[in-house]
Amino acid sequence: MFYTLVRKDLLLEFRTKEIIIPMFTFGLAIILIFSLSFNASQEINHTFSPGLLWIIILFVSSLGLHRMFVLEKEFDAFTLNLAAPIDRGTIFISKVVSGTILLLIAEIMIIPPFVVFMNLSIPSNWPIMMLILIIGDLGIMSIGAIISSLSMRAKLSEILFPILFFPLVSPHLIACVKATNYWFKGIPFINWQSWVYLIITFFIIFFLVGFMIFDFIAEE
Amino acid sequence: MMFNIYNIINNTPMVPDQFWAQKIFYLHVPIAWTGFLSYLIVMIAGILFLKRKNIFWDHLGFAAAEIGTLFITLVLITGPIWAKPIWGTWWTWEPRLTTTLILFLIYIGYFMLRAFGGHPERTSRYAAVLGIIAFIDVPIIFFSVRFWEEKYQSHPQVEITKQNPEIIIPFLISLVIFTILFVFMLKYRLHVLKVIFDR
Amino acid sequence: MLTINNISKSFFHRKILENLSFKVKRGDTIALLGKNGIGKSTLLRILGKISQPDVGDILYKNSSIYKEKASVRKGMLYLGHDVGLYPSLSVIDNIKFACTVHGVKVKENSILNTLNQLGLSKRIDDQIKIFSKGMLQSLKYALADLIEWDILFFDEPFSSLDLKRRKIAQDYINQWTSKSKTMIFATHDPEWGLSYCSRILLLDDCKIKIDQKTTQTEINQITKTLQ
């Protein structure tokens, strides 16, 4: 059942392309704005690029999440999921997973131009970075799916969503930026593994909370 | 309340290197404590509302959120006033301050959700959920900011209180008085909400 | 089959439903009547577990749909005001998805067969966002035909249908009635309710005002309340 729901989300995206393309272009636009407005030397680019990367991911993910839940609202399609004999927790997990897949695809498209425009050199142990990206995205999507289903039926949902989402996700963002920063400077994993554990903890906590609580927020 | 302020001004010893600035400690810390207490109450009320569906718990959560935000605002005002003479700067990204600020922002969103949520019954449910996840976020914010700020700021007042009974007794009095004030405000606000609801 | 226990629902100050209790027996065909905004749709959405009541419980085949796992709701089908399908997906994708989430496996042939009866077989690869209201309404009948259900909640079964589609729709309903399936229709048409349903539920003032067999009901009894 979980597979069907994820498949539906991806199929929707495949048909409409309303999520990934805006995410990608929006990400490019942010990179452009930042490069132009700071016009910084390479050392400065090096120091703040981890933070910038996660800011871009956060903005892009909030765009994607909002879009994902708007697609559910048109034609009242979400009622189909609600009325069907599926546990609400399953719907939540499917949203987190399909959101993460879409976000990862957008990141794969965004990161190469990011590296090129910011003139960055990539450290060699990139599998760890992949891990940080995947768990980081899962964490962002867990809290994001809770918040966007809270705000999707409200008036002003497009404003309410970032106002609720950004403060709540801030500790997660700190951890992701820190971990990326250490990785980027080439410091051995042993020295900063606690940050990765913090990211994992955040993901697990909000994944479980969302799983348990989705019953109360999915219904009208 | 009056007695408390009088007591703080006249009957507490001056801390050698802090002078008058230290007096705000008697207000700042109890206010912060009350603020976090009310947010804890928001969470508990949220859980009970989701379980029992009784409108009382919704009112309790709302009232506590309002009073809590009032107190947290005061914390954010008194904090810099105290920090300026002692740390030499209005604001540092110190774990407690940062946690308080983030929590304040989340609760601004909480009130917006209450205002723009649509159907009242659903809004109550959503607000309860938000109250729960906001409070779950508190320890995570605290620890991540604490790791983040490596040159961790010391809290001079904590060590002082441990040493000096002349400070700790007025402080405790202030703490109790603020908690009592909070309970009265909460009761009053609950009554108002109930009257509005029943009308 | 379905037991509704003390359901209440209010939108803040305004009570919509108050202490509603009734039972639905197997084979009942119920016409749910009432004025606009009286809570017919709300009641159906609560039964379909899309909306939450403030208090109360619903037992379906003796298990509570609130306290037990979602799988106990298998066999319930809710068709709402809006079509409840994804506008950007094609007809065939939508139907396949709807059947799978309801735990039903269907063959492509039977989907084509049903769509053919509804006059939609040429449009199976079209996105449903370009469909007219009446075509979307017909799609609901396709769902009801393909998904195996034990109880059906249908909000406004005939809205936006032209005469031809209305006749097809009526044929489907007759077919289900002859198999003595359990159905609840929310409708504005008391005469249709009296002639095609076996039982009348009339909502008024947050309560069920009339609950009786259609054979014992006079039309003016109902129209008096509706006016």
Image (spheres, coloured by chain):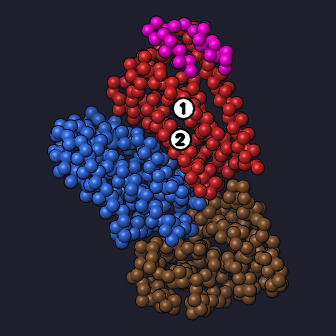
Name the subunit of mark 2.
B
Q: Which chain is red?
A: B
CA gap between label 1 and label 2 equals 10 Å
Q: Residue B175 location, x and y as percent?
A: 61, 21
Q: Where's the C terminus of chain A, which quadrant? A: bottom right
- Read off the residue under disc 2: B107
Q: Residues within 10 Å of mark 1 (few under 14, many from 20)?
A: many
Residue at 27% across, 49% down: A33
Work out whether residue B13 can be spotted: yes
In this rendering, position of residue B61 left or right of residue B104: right
Front position in the image: B170 or A184: B170
- Percent x, y for residue C74? 58, 70
Q: Are marks 1 and 2 in contact (CB under 8 Å)?
A: yes
- Helix, strand or loop for the magenta stretch, by majority: helix
Q: Say if C27 sits above or below A182 in the image.
A: below
Q: Which chain is brown?
A: C
**Residue at the (53%, 52%) spot, across then down:** A212
Spot occupied by residue B68 in the image (x, y as percentages of width and height): 58, 34
Residue B140 locus on image (x, y percent): 44, 37
Q: Which residue is mark 1?
A: B72
Q: Nearer the viewer, residue A79 or C68?
A: A79
Q: Amino acid at mark 1?
A: Ile
Give the crowd class for mark 2: few <14, some 14-19, many >=20 residues within 10 Å.
many
| Magenta stretch, residue numbers | B1-27
Residue C60 visible somewhere in the drawing: no
**Marks 1, 2 in one chain:** yes
- Which colour denotes chain A? blue
Question: Tag 2 or tag 1, which sits nearer the N-term?
Answer: 1
